[in-house]
Amino acid sequence: MTTTTTNKNPILSVVDGKICIGGKTFEVTELRESKEWLQSLGAEEAFFYPENDEEVDELHEIVTRMGEASPEASGKDALSYYLN
């Protein structure tokens, strides 16, 4: 019998101006790769535990830049972030 380790709720963090998901860091040009990473983990929802408001703002800026750099992104006024 084969078992697969999944992380249904990986942790998001900000590392050196980049997004880190479940311990793996992604450049702003790697939106597709971050989505594939979440899928490979079997993630249902990622959690973000900011230490302060500045970290929230930094994550928002990173996600916005990822969207601008990706032809997959659409819409400008995202209130939440879905990577599906």
Image (cartoon, grey):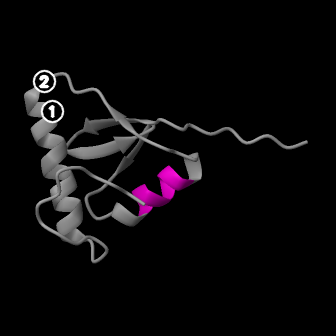
Type of amino acid under label 2: Asn
User: Which residue is painted at 11% across and 60% down in the image?
Assistant: 77
Work out which residue is located at the far bottom of the displayed protein and give it.
71
Q: Report the side of 25 relative to 74 (left or right).
A: right
Q: Position of residue 72 (x, y in %)?
A: 31, 74
Question: Could you say where residue 78 lies in the image, as x and y percent from the top left?
Answer: 17, 57
Q: Position of residue 50 (x, y in %)?
A: 22, 27
Does the segment drawn in magenta span residue 19? no
Q: Position of residue 76 (x, y in %)?
A: 12, 66
Q: Amino acid at mark 1?
A: Glu
Q: Secondary structure at mark 1?
A: helix
> Could you say which quadrant of the image residue 30 lies in?
bottom left
**What span is colored magenta in the figure?**
33-39
Distance of mark 1 from mark 2, alpha carbons?
6 Å
Asked if residue 20 lies left or right of residue 52, the reply is: right
The residue depicted at 30 percent of the width and 56 percent of the height is: 27
Rendered image quadrant of residue 5: top right
Q: Would you say residue 36 sits in the magenta stretch?
A: yes
Q: Residue at x 25, y 58 (%)?
A: 28
| 42 vs 66, nearest the viewer | 42
Quadrant in which the N terminus is drawn: top right
Q: Which residue position is annotated with label 2?
A: 52
Residue identifier under label 1: 55
- The chief SS type of the magenta part is helix
